[in-house]
Amino acid sequence: MSYIRNVLQPGETIRYQGSVHWVLYLPAIGLAFVSVAIAAVSSIMSWPYGWISAAACLLLGLLLAVRAWFIRWMTEIAVTDRRVIYARGFIQRHSVEVHMDKIESVDVDQTVFGRLLDYGDVTIHGTGTTLEPLRAVDRPIEFRNQVTAS
């Protein structure tokens, strides 16, 4: 059962539930392409150890893909009618909850690539504290709109 479902108060409803964007998989995808390119070039040029380099790149890409999947699986972001909840981690859980009446502003930072793929970093400024930036949030504008629409 998810962390967010466990911490909901009686009568509290989830307005928005998000996650980290799939862009975390891009390094793994890039290494898979590099692996295929190395294998193709080494077969054309008769490079005897090219398959070892291709296999090493593919293995590293697989490890990065598993890491990205794990990060997406273990990161939960939600906006309820009362608060914003952010939780990440598996064995060591890090969670932050900010009540809606304590939120002063929400900043969204997107690169050009982030605007094209609809992801970005979101920073929530509260009274007295600032939540650390939530990195690579999927649909950050919708997330911000849900937080500020109270």
Image (cartoon, grey):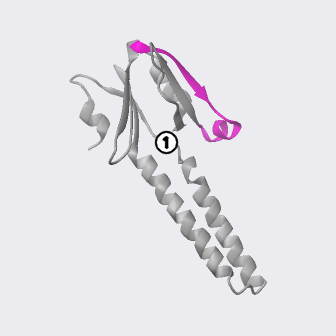
Residue shown at the point (60%, 53%) measured from the top left: 26
The quadrant in which the N terminus is found is top left
Which residues are the magenta region?
102-119
Quadrant assignment, res 119: top right
From the top left corner, tell me how far across and down residue 43 is, in percent.
72, 84
On screen, residue 113 versus residue 127, left or right, reads: right
**How many residues crowd around disc 1 within 10 Å: few (fewer than 14), some, or many (20 or more)?**
many
Q: Amino acid type of disc 1?
A: Val
Q: Which sits in the foreground, 118 or 87?
A: 87
Q: Secondary structure at mark 1?
A: loop
Say if 51 sits above or below 113 in the image: below
Residue shown at the point (61%, 56%) measured from the top left: 27
Label 1 sits on residue: 20
> Is 45 covered by the magenta stretch?
no
On screen, residue 22 versus residue 49, left or right, reads: left
Q: Which sits in the foreground, 50 or 6?
A: 50
On screen, residue 19 versus residue 112, left or right, reads: left
Q: Residue furthest right?
A: 45
Q: Is residue 128 visible?
A: yes
Say if 20 sits above or below 95 in the image: below
